Image (cartoon, rainbow, N blue to C red):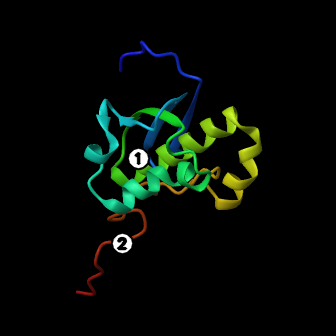
Amino acid sequence: MAKAKMYDTHAVGKRKTSVARVYLAVGEGKILVNGRDFQNYFNRDSIKYMVTQPLNLLNVRDKYDVVINVAGGGPTGQAGAIRLGISRAITQLDPAARGELKKAGFLTRDARIVERKKYGVRGARRSFQFSKR
């Protein structure tokens, strides 16, 4: 990521095993994810919608340029991490928007992660098939 442009604020968002670093600057509404336009980075419309939810809620889609570095997990986890990061960054720039974002649930960290596998069983909880004889 070329940091030639000075960003107004940055925030970190996490979901499952994904971590997104979000940089926000006043601009014309460009969203870059890992150096690519987010329309090309994500291929499902539901995920594209999820990424832009905080911006659309506050009607500031064309007011900010967003540069995102995201790593880990899959598309859904990355989109959730980005949504949280954008919400936190907007809250830093405009504290008045916090109430609306919080009410919509965009400032809540989704703590659900995959449960670890236990010894002696097939998965986290699933046991091996029992045989009587």
Q: Is residue 68 above or below residue 53?
A: above
Judging by the rendered image, the residue that carries numbered circle 2 is: 127
Query: In the displayed structure, does residue 105 sit left or right of residue 72?
Result: right
The x and y percentages for residue 107 are 64, 50
Judging by the rendered image, the residue that carries numbered circle 1 is: 78
* Residue at figure coordinates x 35%, y 21% from the top left: 1
Query: In the displayed structure, does residue 16 sit left or right of residue 102?
Result: left
Q: Which of 13 and 95 is in front in this view?
A: 95
The x and y percentages for residue 73 are 36, 46
Q: Which residue lies furthest to the top in this view?
A: 4
SS at mark 1 in the image: helix
Identify which amino acid the numbered label 2 is placed on.
Ser
* Residue at figure coordinates x 28%, y 44% from the top left: 41
Of badges 1 and 2, the one in the foreground is 1
Quarter-wise, where is residue 123 in the image?
Answer: bottom left
Is residue 15 visible from the viewing direction of this image? no
Query: In the displayed structure, does residue 54 sit left or right of residue 71?
Result: right
* Residue at figure coordinates x 71%, y 46% from the top left: 97
The local crowd at label 1, few if under 14, some if 14 to 19, many if 20 or more residues have their Cα within 10 Å, is many
* Residue at figure coordinates x 45%, y 38% from the top left: 29
Identify which amino acid the numbered label 1 is placed on.
Gln
Q: In this view, does 126 lie above or below 4?
A: below
Q: Which of 97 and 102 is in front in this view?
A: 97
Q: Which residue lies furthest to the left in this view?
A: 133
Is residue 3 visible from the viewing direction of this image? yes
Q: Which residue lies furthest to the bottom in this view?
A: 132
